[in-house]
Amino acid sequence: MSPLSLYNTLTRRVEPLEPLAPPRVTLYTCGPTVWNYAHIGNFRTFLFEDLLRRWLEHSGYEVFHVMNLTDVDDRTIKAAAAAGKSLTEHTEPFTQAFFEDRDYLRIKPAHVYPRATQYIKPMVALVSRLLERGVAYKGEDGSVYFAIAKFPAYGRLSQLDRRELKTGARVSSDEYAKDDARDFALWKKSDAEDEAVGAAWDAPFGRGRPGWHLECSAMSLDEIGRRFGAETLDIHAGGVDLIFPHHEDEIAQSEAATGKPFARHWLHGEFLNVRGTKMSKRFGNFLTARDLRDQGVDAGAVRLLFSQTHYRQSIDFNDEALDGAREGVRRLGEFRERLTGDGGRGTGDGPLAELGKKMEAEFTAALNDDLNAPRAVAALFEFVRAANRGMDGGAAGSGKALAAFDRVTGVLDVLPTPKRLDSALSAWVEERLAARAQARKSKDFKAADAIRAELVARGVEIEDTPQGTKWRVV
Ligand SMILES: [Zn+2]
């Protein structure tokens, strides 16, 4: 197993990954709240987690990846009520949209996607356990709260000053600020709106619905408990905005119930900014994955763009950066074609094979160092430059170089999406090429040039060779 080190938010240090039962790694990543389409800021987090997952697997670990779907919380209920729909009617299309967006961006599917509404039983059990242990209590408003004063480790992840805690005071909304740390709701007494959208369940401590934080604790413990008899996750990941209160509260609920550490390694990805501001509906700079897809943006370009910044640094998303990534992806695709076409120069050793070996070593060292993707990408492009020079000079070893290139691009998954050729386009291109050949034969170069321009306008690149005119869609 390679020595992979990752930054741990819990200790604020880069530490070697030490899973409880190697080669297995249990990975829990907080999934989307399916009240609306996920925006590309959300997908930046999911893509960083995709890189983590792929690198763990590439390194020989057997990853069990759980990503929850939050289909009941303050926001989903409000959105369903506003749309005049039941919770399920409102959330299901957004769940399907999330899966489509995931596939567009080539994110590896998690092994399970527990939906909160289907895990009410383990949630009720967890609240009961916390009540029995005396760390939770029922408020006079009928909701059940977690008493942060009863959990001395509260605040460790987000480095809260315990003197700032408003012990005894309560907050019932799912989201609140760090300077408002107080007893939070585990189970919310249902109101008329909850009942109207079908977001209310019976429980021994009163009819109601789970708090958002409780959901992740109950689902993750249920998944790893049933499958592996474990009560501790190897890695828990999410966006930095989840550190407080979400992950802090998850730790409190889980550890107060099990008496075991909830997760050994906490990883958090930074924000994506648009025009210098964190993207959100509120700021009107909201962009979804499907917006990019509809604009014809190749998923490879989005993946490369995000790989060029370390996951613990914020990214500024703009057209220039995206164009740069598009160009990078195009170069990688062309390079691979050239390397494949160079197969004649052998499967043996040679300068190209050596370059590939060096690149792969640098790539591995970079990702083992807290997933330093920008350094890994730099090594890849340096290899492309050097190998292109090598091929110009007829260097040998392209077979091994190609294998190394495929291994690393398999991790990043940044090659251009293969264009699907439809037969109507092919027929049109062939017809236009025949007309162009005819024009050239009769020395009507003006007409021939016009046809070439027509082809280019539809993304068809042509090349005249001694064997005839070759074409491809770019
Ligand atoms: Zn969560």
Image: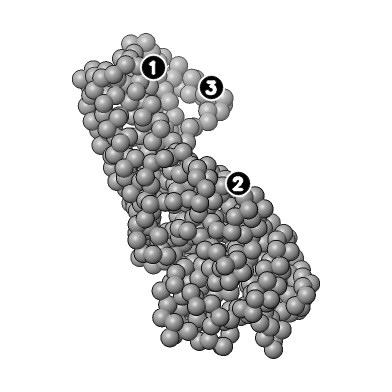
Residue at left 57%, top 67%?
259
Judge whether residue 1 can be spotted in this image. Answer: yes
The quadrant in which residue 458 appears is: top left
Q: Which residue is mark 1?
A: 469
Residue 86 quadrant: bottom right
Callout 1: SS? strand
Say which mark, if any, is on residue 427: 3
Q: Nearer the viewer, residue 38 or 454?
A: 38
Q: Which of the marked residues, 3 or 1, is nearer the chain's N terminus? A: 3
Per the rendering, the mark at residue 382 is: none
Comparing 28 with 75, the one in front is 28
* Up/down of 71 relative to 353, above or below: below
Disc number lying in front (2 or 3): 2
In this rendering, position of residue 78 left or right of residue 248:
right
User: Is the residue under label 2 in contact with that under label 1 (CB below 8 Å)?
Assistant: no
Asked whether 51 or 57 is in front, the reply is: 57
Which residue position is annotated with label 2?
111
Q: CA distance from mark 3 to mark 1?
A: 15 Å
Residue 441 or residue 263, whichever sits in front: 263
